[in-house]
Amino acid sequence: MQRKLKTLALLLPGVLLLSMQAVNAQSSSPPPATATRPAETMPGQTSVPNDGPPATRTQTTGQTNPDPTVKEMNEDAKRKIEREGK
């Protein structure tokens, strides 16, 4: 009997809270429709233009020529893949 009373005492506040939330949800009015609308004409450019020179086709990426040993190893690996596949 005591166990049933304890269970009931623990569940009762939760049931009351849920029922109060349901009543509140039904009786509250919807939020006002005060959303901002997008502008008819977009504002001008607000970012600062880049002062750097334009890129050229001959501009390098900073990569240097690899060591001849590394170059040879890469070529060997390419040949191996062509022969055997991955």
Image: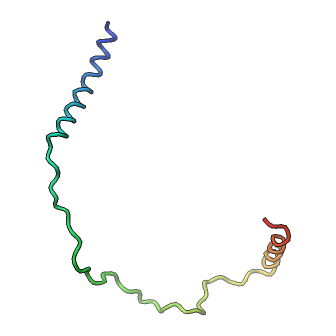
In-image side of 65 versus 60 (left or right):
right
Direction front: furthest residue = 26
> In front: 78, or 49?
78
| Identity of the residue drawn at 27% across and 18% down | 9
- Work out which quarter of the rendered image holds the N terminus and state it: top left
> In front: 64, or 56?
56
Q: Which colour scheme is used?
A: rainbow
In-image side of 33 versus 56 (left or right):
left
| Identity of the residue drawn at 32% across and 17% down | 7
Give percent across and percent down for residue 83.
85, 71
33 over 15 or under it: above or below: below
75 over 8 or under it: above or below: below
In-image side of 70 versus 30 (left or right):
right
Give percent across and percent down for residue 61.
60, 84
**Residue 3: which quarter of the image?**
top left
47 over 80 or under it: above or below: below
**Residue 11: which quarter of the image?**
top left
- Work out which quarter of the rendered image holds the C terminus and state it: bottom right
Give percent across and percent down for residue 46.
30, 81
| Identity of the residue drawn at 77% across and 80% down | 67
In-image side of 44 versus 58 (left or right):
left
Direction top: furthest residue = 1
**Residue 18: which quarter of the image?**
top left
How many numbered markers are drawn?
A: 0
> In front: 55, or 86?
86
> In front: 34, or 3?
34
Give percent across and percent down for residue 74.
78, 75
